[in-house]
Image (cartoon, coloured by chain):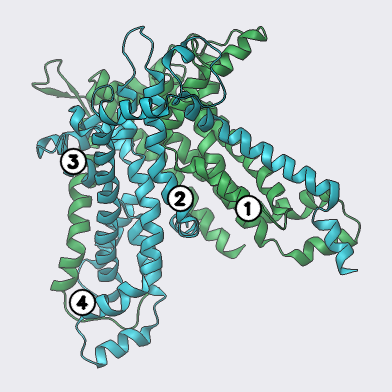
Chain colours: A green, B cyan
Amino acid sequence: MEKRVTFRGWLLPFLLIAPQVAISAIFFFYPAGQAIWQSLFIPDPFGLSSQFVGLGNFEFLLGDRYYRAAFGTTAIFSILVTVFSMIPALFLAVTADRLIKGSGVYRTMLIWPYAVAPAIAGVLWLFMFNTRVGVVSWYLGNLGYDWNHVLNGGEAMGLVAVASAWGRISYNFLFFYAALQAVPRSVIEAAAIDGARFWRRFFTIVLPLLSPTTFFLLVVNIVYSFFETFGVIHTITSGGPQQSTTILVYKVFSDGFVGQDLGSSSAQSVILLIVVGLLTIFQFKFIEKRVHY
Amino acid sequence: MANDVQGMVEKRGAGLWLTHVFMIFGVLVIFFPIWLAFVASTVSQADIVSPPMPLLPGDKFLENYSAALFSGVNVPVTTMLFNSLIMAIGIAVGKIVISLLSAFAIVYFRFPCRTMFFWMIFLTLMLPVEVRIVPTYEVVAGFGMLNSYGGLIFPLIASATATFLFRQFFLTIPDELAEAARVDGARPMRFFWDIVLPMSRTNIAALFVILFIYGWNQYLWPLLITTDPEMNTIVMGIKQMFPSGDDFANWPVILATSILAMIPPVIVVISMQRLFIRGLVDSEK
């Protein structure tokens, strides 16, 4: 879509667009280009010179046991986060939607956690499950279950996934609730007159009508779990134990800043860049469809 | 009849109460981590290190919060709160200003390379800062912007979401307005100030809420570039409060800091709920 009425002149628009173009160039395009460039080199241990290795870094990464493991970890983690955050949100939204009065109050109570930073969420959940002082781990111990996410990789994964999903429940709730409110009352009432009970109405009418929202949230939550959960993982497990919670973004950080392996870290950035690109294209394609739904 | 149908769809009587019970249960479960942190921030360290800790607030509220605010662990929390505030406002205002200007240029002018610039900005949608941390860090270090507000703010402004939002909105402004302004001989910037900006008020406010929270909650970027505790933001500073060895963390002070860290964004979300929801929905479209 274009405007029919525009203003003349070219100096003014250049000046107007200059700040954004400059910032994008300096802090976005140049670093992204650097990442691609550096991914083709291996710097020597002293950082004095570097050797061109072509796609060597990528070849190494794809053959690397730890990197492949990080891919698997990311997949499991993002599935867990998506499931843990979307299903409770859908339940709460469906319940709230059945209330005529008071749902606004519940909504206010439920959007709180969205404002809590992932890193803070990490601290709160770490506190509950702390092996020495945690309340939940203490009660689990009393029930005969010895909780120890510091040693047990599976428990560590569960904990970071739940802590990451927690704040997202609010977000998903808002979208599900808005979508439910938009379902035409008359359709539901017609089904009710025809004798369809709640669950039947839910599965045959409501859920299909929610599918665009569900699909949209699926993509958004996966992107969230890929990139924005760094704070949760860093505060709770720092990627451990034995890298069992090292997702791809965490590995870019730990190889680049802790391990100082710039070539590999850059190559990982480039791979992530491709992954984000694909996810974005996927999302845009879907949004095109959503308009015509 | 109408009432009967409504009765089938909406809950009445016992069913209504069950629904409320279910909602309250959900709210309580979601709330529990925050409640526990609040309780822990009002009791003494001794209460916490001998589990289970109490589940009702203690009497150390003032003590813990003033310890956090005025001495902290590495640096007083007031300093970190101030840094976070500057960063969050800087990011929100910065993004809104540069996006308003560039969207105005893209929508209301035809100039050379317009499409190229448009795609250039569009591409930045795709790459979160987490993905390009190492080279971005080098750029910021090269400018000598480590441990500075500029270093905290600028790299996070380079994103196109806001530009797109404003572009979409400007396209809905009736052409007659621009036509009238042109006939009256108004210069473009006059049109921008008198018409476009006032009309965008709600969008700007909604976006501000979202961007403020986004900026406030940043973790990885401040972690990398603020090595000086004086420049720590509160969200990343909390992790620095944990002891590195096997010592017990000072939980009451750490959790008091966590509560303090969530108060500003929570106030923003709750008090501007309608704008917040609007901003959320808009910025995801």
User: Is residue A288 visible in this depiction of the protein?
Assistant: yes
Amino acid type, residue under disc 2 in the picture: Val
Along the polypeptide, which appears first: circle 2 or circle 4? Answer: 4
Task: Please state which amino acid type lies under the numbered disc 3.
Answer: Gly
The residue carrying mark 1 is A177
Residues packed near mark 2 inside 10 Å, few (<14), some (14 to 19) or many (20 plus): many
Residue A229 in view of the camera: no
- State the residue at coordinates (27%, 79%): B194
- Residue at the disc numbered 4: B189
Q: Which mark is residue B269?
A: 2
Q: Residue at x 16, y 78 (%)?
A: A9
Chain letter, disc 4 residue: B
* Pointer 4 and pointer 3 on the same chain: yes
The kind of residue tagged 4 is Met
Circle 4 crowding by C-alpha within 10 Å: few under 14, some 14–19, many from 20: few
Q: Could you give the CA–CA distance between mark 2 and mark 3, rounded to whole angstroms? A: 27 Å
Kindly identify the amino acid type of the residue bearing the numbered disc 1. Answer: Tyr
